[in-house]
Image (cartoon, grey):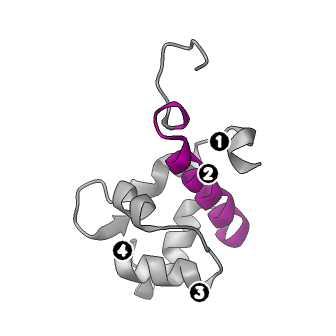
């Protein structure tokens, strides 16, 4: 708790916050950004990819953390797809360093 008046994911669900922080760190290192990851993994330059294809692509590139809850959280409209707009927040988010320790 930081007394900021705002609730963050690391306060509500530390385990998910760690996975999300590791995901952000991974896509930033591997693809330059979350947007870059989506574009690299989606076929034909489409800015939308099925959850299954996204999961498989991340695993092929070495993301070895539990993905079920992560992908469910990224799929905001329950369409079973990840779209560029679903990942936009990640490119602005700066996770607390403790989440990556």
Q: Quadrant of residue 51?
A: bottom left
Q: Nearer the viewer, residue 71 or 77?
A: 71
Specify the label residue 95 is tagged with: 1
Crowding near the residue tagged with mark 1, few <14, some 14–19, many ≥20 C-alpha atoms within 10 Å: some
Q: In the image, what residue occupies the spot 52% across and 31% down?
A: 11
Q: Secondary structure at mark 3?
A: helix
Quarter in which the N terminus is drawn: top right
Q: Secondary structure at mark 4?
A: helix
**Where are the magenta residues, as a range?**
10-31
* Disc 2 target residue: 21
Specify the label residue 60 is tagged with: 3
Q: CA distance from mark 4 to mark 2?
A: 19 Å
Q: Earlier in the sequence, mark 4 or mark 3?
A: 4
86 part of magenta stretch = no
Q: Could you tell me residue 96's position as x and y percent?
A: 68, 37
Q: Earlier in the sequence, mark 2 or mark 3?
A: 2
Q: Is residue 42 left or right of residue 10?
A: left
Q: CA distance from mark 1 to mark 3?
A: 24 Å
Whether 38 is drawn above or below 42: the answer is above
Q: CA distance from mark 2 to mark 3?
A: 19 Å
* Disc 4 target residue: 51
Count of numbered circles on the image: 4
Whether 99 is drawn above or below 19: the answer is above
Whether 52 is drawn above or below 29: the answer is below
Q: Secondary structure at mark 1?
A: loop
Q: Is residue 25 left or right of residue 79?
A: right
Q: Secondary structure at mark 2?
A: helix
Q: Is residue 50 visible?
A: no
């Amino acid at each position: 708790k930081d007394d900021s008046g705002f609730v963050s994911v690391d306060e509500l669900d530390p385990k998910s916050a760690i996975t999300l922080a590791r995901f952000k760190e991974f896509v930033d290192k591997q693809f330059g950004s979350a947007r870059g990851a989506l574009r690299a993994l989606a076929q034909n330059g489409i800015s939308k990819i099925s959850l299954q294809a996204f999961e498989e692509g991340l695993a092929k590139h070495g993301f070895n953390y539990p993905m079920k809850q992560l992908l469910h959280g990224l799929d905001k409209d329950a369409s079973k797809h990840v779209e560029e707009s679903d990942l936009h927040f990640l490119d602005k988010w700066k996770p607390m360093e403790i989440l990556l320790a």
